[in-house]
């Protein structure tokens, strides 16, 4: 539609559109200059990883239209129902990776179903020559509807396997040498797609009249348009979105099929247009807006504050930078509490809260952007207080927290037996710690350090033992979605260099006190030896305590976390799930027939194998994952922000890495069996581990060296 409606012509482009046929080498044509742009499958990332310098501009579809189609009388409603049935798919694993991964998640191996070569003839399904057929949601279902044949579909996206489809791409050379043409083509193409989905009937009639090489009816084309529209937009209503996170998830599917090597690199695959990627609606909104009013905390330095009528601090610098990107001005309304801020937002006095943290209470009135800043919550404790540096010790203490802090609500729920004392300022909280009126004060690290330096307080230490984060977002009223979209775009456009520049300006706190040394030299010599002895003793004790702490948290053989530390991480993830619905999963695995290794080669060789295995697993995990030894040859991995589908992909990647490694046991290859489980509502840690253990037992009973998923518990089923 971009060509037919003149969108290309409006930006000075004369575009020749060529129809694809199976003999076309899309990537080769683009790299050679035979074509400037092309539309390809998600397997383009394999070409990128292989060294072809191509750039993905946008994805026409956020989810692939590929799914499995069955007649209703076959009673095939879930992937598990396919066991013992015939499935018609292409032989190219790259094209059907999401379907194969979905079947694997359901516990189906190649031997559990008959893989038939695809005939691309729907009549084979109708005539019962196959039980399920790889099809597109936009095509074959319509044909069955017209014939009056009931059907069922199984879509990989419903089971956590999301794939982009129809990716517009070009060469890196085109982007670098002709950036203007690239960007104009990019924007006009998106405009054309959006027009097509907003005018499906008009688009179908045009395709039928001028581009109907498949001889389809207008009604079929309209059905296709409606089906594809449902796949085209992301959760924010944006068209064409590409994200590195989703590409990395897709890459795991291709790792399973062997199409990608583990050391793949696609970091510069996504097109980064200059400036912000704003829709026409968003640009029109900004042109009318001009000014944004902020409700800003007046005294939370160095994050934000107002001094001499000047809005300053780390958050203030972020807002200034985002305003520059959006070409708007800012007006600041100072507030002294979260309650006052919420009232001013609800009454319309402010458009935006620049330093907000998502909570259930705030979520009733406000919508929150993607976080642009994360910082740990810390507890400040007096050096004279005894603290073993565990969050559990805070459960019965007197704790101070700012009255306008979101952690006031959080701490009251987390520590019902503690005395939570609201204070008005950071200074007041720290003074109560200084006088030991309270055991600790909880806030963000930079605000505490800033106040300690400003007020010359000594003898107070910060501990990062709460295992919690301040995820700072922009908040708007729930009825102002377009403003939220605009700021999400601006936040996404922040570069690492811009983040670092702001952080370095405000978070590097130097302690510099002037000391009069006139009299010190008179007594310095007398105490010099004593100071050296004390310093040496302190170092010995400090080193010893450090070693003790490490030993208390790590397995002595492998150096990875021990069971106690894993429980700490599990409890932390459980709290985040209960508070924010942040899902997590666990992988429970052990070494197959490990007793035979010890019996045949000795325990020293067995220990060597366990250490090597731990090293292999560590190299394959994400930085955010927590890996430890549960006991003997059993291991556990905690996967934050992971669903069952992600856990399956990671487990399979680990299983293959271990099975392919040469442990130098001539007659006994080392393999592992894996059980995975995802947290459920009202879950306990024990119940979660039990389900993963049951899945591991199932893997053992079904031949070992495989992965099995835990079934939902009866309570949540």
Image (cartoon, helix red, strand yellow):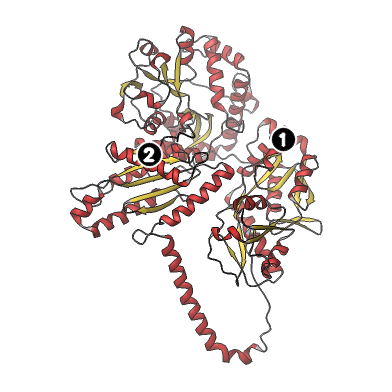
At x 67% / y 70%, what residue is drawn? 434
Side of 269 where 423 appears, left or right: right
Q: On the image, which quarter does residue 11 sit in? A: top right
Camera-nearest residue between 247 and 477: 477
Q: Residue at x 73, y 49 (%)?
A: 338
x then y, percent, for residue 38: 49, 28
Residue 511 in the image, given as x and y percentages of width and height: 64, 71
Q: Earlier in the sequence, mark 1 or mark 2?
A: 2
Which quarter of the figure has residue 418?
bottom right
Q: Is residue 350 visible?
A: no
Image position, residue 678 (x, y; %): 46, 40
* Alpha carbon distance from label 1 to label 2: 41 Å
User: Looking at the image, is mark 1 or mark 2 nearer the viewer?
Assistant: 1
Relative to 371, 160 lies left or right: left
State the residue in front, 154 or 700. 700
Crowding near the residue tagged with mark 1, few <14, some 14–19, many ≥20 C-alpha atoms within 10 Å:
few
Q: Where is mark 1, residue-wise? A: 480
Position of 655 with respect to 65 (left or right) is left
User: Looking at this view, is 557 or 623 the one in front?
Assistant: 557
> Looking at the picture, how far across and down is residue 115, in whole percent?
31, 23
Compared to 119, does 438 lie above or below? below
Mark yes or no: residue 503 visible.
yes
Marks 1 and 2 close (CB-CB < 8 Å): no
Q: Residue 344's mark?
A: none
- Taking the view exactly as shown, the residue that stands out farthest to the front is 417
Query: Which residue carries the number 2 mark?
Result: 255
Number of numbered callouts drawn: 2
Q: Residues within 10 Å of mark 2 (few under 14, many from 20)?
A: some
Label 1: state its secondary structure.
loop
Q: Quadrant of the N terminus?
A: top right
């Amino acid at each position: 539609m971009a060509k037919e409606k003149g969108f290309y012509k409006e930006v000075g482009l004369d575009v020749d559109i060529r129809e694809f046929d199976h003999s076309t080498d899309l990537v080769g044509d683009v790299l050679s200059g035979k074509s400037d742009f092309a539309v390809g499958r998600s397997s383009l990332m394999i070409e990128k990883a292989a060294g072809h310098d191509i750039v993905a501009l946008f994805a026409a579809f956020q989810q692939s239209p590929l799914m499995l189609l069955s007649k209703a009388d076959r009673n095939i409603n879930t992937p598990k129902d396919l066991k013992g049935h015939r499935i018609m798919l292409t032989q190219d694993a790259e094209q059907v990776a999401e379907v194969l991964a979905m079947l694997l998640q359901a516990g189906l191996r190649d031997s559990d179903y008959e893989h038939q070569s695809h005939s691309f003839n729907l009549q084979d399904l109708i005539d019962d020559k196959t039980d399920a057929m790889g099809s597109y949601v936009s095509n074959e279902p319509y044909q069955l509807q017209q014939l009056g044949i009931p059907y069922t579909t199984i879509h990989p996206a419903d089971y956590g396997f999301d794939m982009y489809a129809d990716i517009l791409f070009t060469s890196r050379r085109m982007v670098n040498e002709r950036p203007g043409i690239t960007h104009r083509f990019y924007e006009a193409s998106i405009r054309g797609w959006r027009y097509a989905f907003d005018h499906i009937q008009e688009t179908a009639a045009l395709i039928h009249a001028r581009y109907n090489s498949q001889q389809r009816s207008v009604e079929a084309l309209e059905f296709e348009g409606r089906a594809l529209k449902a796949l085209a937009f992301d959760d924010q209503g944006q068209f064409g979105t590409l994200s590195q996170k989703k590409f990395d998830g897709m890459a795991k599917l291709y790792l399973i099929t062997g199409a990608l090597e583990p050391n793949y690199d696609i970091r510069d695959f996504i097109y980064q247009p200059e400036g912000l990627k704003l829709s026409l609606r968003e640009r029109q909104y900004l042109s009318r807006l001009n000014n944004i009013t902020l409700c800003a905390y007046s005294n939370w330095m160095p994050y934000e504050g107002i001094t001499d009528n000047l809005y300053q601090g780390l958050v203030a610098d972020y807002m200034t930078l985002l305003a520059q990107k959006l070409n708007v001005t800012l007006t600041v309304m100072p507030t002294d509490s979260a309650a006052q801020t919420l009232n001013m937002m609800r009454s319309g006095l402010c458009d935006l809260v620049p330093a907000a943290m998502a909570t259930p209470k705030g979520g009733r009135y406000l919508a929150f952007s993607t976080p642009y800043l994360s910082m740990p919550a810390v507890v400040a404790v007096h050096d004279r207080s005894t603290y073993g540096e565990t969050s559990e010790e805070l459960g019965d203490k007197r704790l101070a927290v700012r009255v306008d802090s979101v952690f006031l609500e959080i701490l009251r729920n987390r520590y019902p037996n503690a005395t939570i004392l609201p204070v008005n300022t950071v200074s007041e909280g720290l003074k109560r710690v200084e006088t030991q009126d309270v055991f600790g004060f909880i806030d963000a690290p930079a605000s505490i350090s800033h106040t300690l330096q400003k007020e010359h307080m000594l003898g107070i230490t910060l501990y990062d033992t709460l295992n919690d984060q301040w995820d700072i977002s922009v908040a708007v009223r729930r009825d102002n979605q377009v403003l939220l979209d605009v700021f999400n775009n601006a936040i996404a456009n922040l570069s690492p260099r811009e983040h670092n520049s702001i952080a370095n300006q405000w978070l590097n706190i130097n302690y510099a006190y002037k000391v009069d040394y006139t009299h010190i030299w008179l007594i310095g010599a007398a105490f010099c030896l004593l100071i050296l002895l004390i310093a040496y003793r302190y170092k010995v004790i400090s080193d010893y305590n450090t070693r003790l702490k490490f030993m208390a948290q790590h397995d002595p053989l492998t150096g990875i976390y021990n069971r106690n530390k894993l429980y700490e991480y599990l409890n932390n993830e459980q709290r985040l799930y209960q508070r924010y619905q942040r899902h997590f999963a666990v992988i429970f695995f052990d070494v197959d027939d490990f007793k035979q290794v010890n019996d045949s080669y000795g325990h020293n060789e067995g220990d060597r194998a366990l250490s090597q295995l731990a090293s292999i697993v560590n190299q394959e995990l994400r930085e955010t994952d927590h890996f430890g030894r549960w006991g003997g040859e059993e291991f556990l991995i905690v996967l934050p922000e992971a669903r069952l589908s992600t856990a399956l992909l990671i487990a399979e990647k680990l299983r293959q890495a271990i099975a392919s490694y040469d442990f130098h046991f001539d007659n006994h290859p080392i393999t592992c069996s894996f059980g995975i489980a995802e947290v459920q509502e009202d879950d306990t840690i024990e119940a979660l581990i039990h389900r993963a253990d049951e899945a591991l037992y199932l893997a053992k009973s079904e031949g070992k060296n495989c992965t099995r998923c835990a079934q939902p518990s009866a309570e949540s089923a």
